[in-house]
Amino acid sequence: VTALPEARTSLTLSVWTIMVSTHGRQQTT
């Protein structure tokens, strides 16, 4: 099943983007 790895990568990218966005906000403050 190739859908599992793909979904996992997509989720990781989404979480990573949120983490970076939050970190950037904290840094700006």
Image (spheres, rainbow, N blue to C red):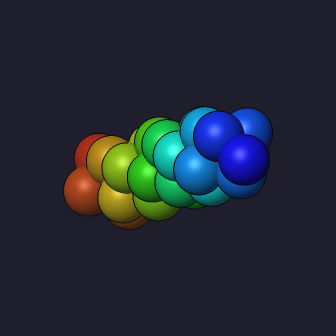
Q: In this picture, is 1 found above or below 10?
A: below
User: Can residue 6 be seen by looking at this rendering?
Assistant: yes
Q: Is residue 8 left or right of residue 26?
A: right
Q: Nearer the viewer, residue 11 or 1?
A: 1
The residue sitting at 59% across, 50% down in the picture is 5
- Of all residues shown, which one is farthest toward the left? 27
Q: Position of residue 19 (x, y in %)?
A: 47, 58
Q: Is residue 13 left or right of residue 29?
A: right
- Of all residues shown, which one is farthest toward the front? 1
The residue sitting at 37% across, 50% down in the picture is 20
- Where the C terminus falls, by quadrant? bottom left
User: Can residue 29 be seen by looking at this rendering?
Assistant: no
Q: Position of residue 11 (x, y in %)?
A: 65, 49
Q: Is residue 23 left or right of residue 17?
A: left
Q: Position of residue 22 (x, y in %)?
A: 48, 55
The residue sitting at 65% across, 40% down in the picture is 2
The residue sitting at 26% across, 56% down in the picture is 27
Tag count? 0
Q: Position of residue 26 (x, y in %)?
A: 38, 60
Q: Nearer the viewer, residue 16 or 8?
A: 8
